[in-house]
Image (cartoon, rainbow, N blue to C red):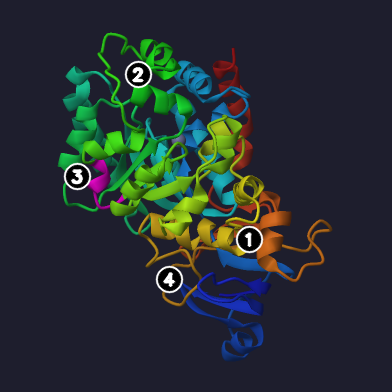
Amino acid sequence: MLLLARYVLPVSGPHIDDGAVLVRGTDIIEVGARSDLLAAYPDEDVLDYGLAALMPGFIDLHTHLEYSVFRGVVDDLPYSRWKMEVQRREAFLSEQDWADSAILGAVEAIRSGITTIADVSDSGAAVAAASDSGLRGVLYREISTMDTAAIDSELSRAFADMAEWATRTDPDRLSIGIAPHSPYTCHPRLFQSIAEAVGGADTHVALHLAGSKDEYDFVKYGSSPLGQDFRTQSGWADQPWMPTGVSPVRYIYQWGLLDLANVMAVHCVHVDDDDIAILERTDVAIAYCARCNAKLGMGTAPLRKFSIRELRVGLGTDSPASNSTMDFFDEMRVGLLIQRGMHGEDGFFSSKTFITMATLDGARALKLDHLIGTLEPGKRADIIAVDLSQSYQVPTQNPYSALVHTSNQEDVLMTMVNGSILYDRGRFLTLDPEVMRDRLEEMRLKVRD
Ligand SMILES: [Zn+2]
């Protein structure tokens, strides 16, 4: 199959005007000029997207597909109150509700041009949604408890689930990992036990780290609503907690978790230079969730400092529960504009840098860059076509800037994973979003006040 467009952005090199990508089976075979590839492969099926950009699919480094139904339910609250409200409503959902909510998340990912997700799931609903939809990704089994008596049983349940998830997923497309939720929901012995259990393996590990000021205050001083109301609501009021006197990053570092081979820290907003040095030394990847962090009043991660240290940083949406949409163009745009707005010319990020963060750098963060993240021969065909012909986009000479500053998820024409088209000009080929609408209304009634 020969894909054609006005612009091809391999990301690994300069963009190609009037470019083409040859896909066969699951792989990219050749990338080059339209005229050259049409001449070399005259009998190939052709899909011409016109005034559009062909580029690697987006890599969403942090989401929770199963939380999609919470969109707009708990809105306009700061982080801790938002977290408590979502947690309170989780009990109202059935297993089928979680499954359908995760499918909604998969629909949104595909519509937005996301081809790889790094999903954190408590219910396990993301496994079927990711598997059936055709998405690529890492599925992290979430684990949390502050109750020392429950640590061993929670751990064995988590590892049993991970083994079961592996039987239901195609290892070429989906990997299984573990996600201790955060410093304020996991007992230190849980972090230590996970570090010991994973040992020298390259198991994917993710955790929310240094996200909100409340988390920072809880870890360092033992204060904030996360140290009181949240622990009471979670049933951990009787579990002792002593202020640690250190930052969340240094605290987690002490328990050995950051020394593991394949760790991703989500948020990293409240980090100082000492914390960043730890993240650099331990080669921890970072999911920059700019829009979620801004919406919930968590703050802004010091992206400039991460980039000076050459940390592995990509972008994450953190699901519609916090972010309202999974629009990855919005994610790039807001993530870039916040940094420019805060720092002016000092550390001025370009659109091209953000396109790279959304693709290749995301692949590096997951250590999947040998397979995905660029359009290069031999890599998997995870490709999107984005329309650039609308009135709000033309004229343009710079496809990077047009993608970041003028495009939205509605402009995605085609989403392909592993050489299979999952979405094409309004049609979903693996999922049926229409049957979801009635179910979503039912679920919304359950979770609203
Ligand atoms: Zn999250």
The CA span between labels 3 and 1 is 38 Å
Q: Secondary structure at mark 2?
A: loop
**Residue position for label 1:** 351
Residue 413 rendering spot, x and y as whole percentages: 67, 59
The CA span between labels 2 and 3 is 29 Å
The CA span between labels 3 and 4 is 29 Å
The CA span between labels 2 and 4 is 48 Å
The CA span between labels 1 and 2 is 40 Å
Which span is picked out in magenta?
257-262
**Residue position for label 4:** 379
Decide: marks 3, 1 in contact (CB < 8 A)? Answer: no
Rendered residue at 62%/61% (across/down)? 350
Q: Nearer the viewer, mark 2 or mark 3?
A: 2
Q: Secondary structure at mark 4?
A: loop
Q: Earlier in the sequence, mark 3 or mark 4?
A: 3
Given the image, on which type of amino acid does mark 2 rest?
Gly
Residue 313 has which mark? none
Whether 7 is among the magenta residues is: no
User: CB of residue at label 2: within 8 Å of ligand 1?
Assistant: no
Q: Residue furthest right?
A: 391
Q: Secondary structure at mark 1?
A: helix
Decide: marks 2, 4 in contact (CB < 8 A)? Answer: no
Q: Nearer the viewer, mark 4 or mark 1?
A: 1
Residue 222 has which mark? 2
The crowd level at tag 4 (other Cα within 10 Å; few <14, some 14-19, many 20+) is some
Decide: marks 2, 3 in contact (CB < 8 A)? Answer: no
Given the image, on which type of amino acid does mark 4 rest?
Lys
Rendered residue at 45%/34% (across/down)? 211
Front one among 284 and 203: 284
Q: Quadrant of the N terminus?
A: bottom right
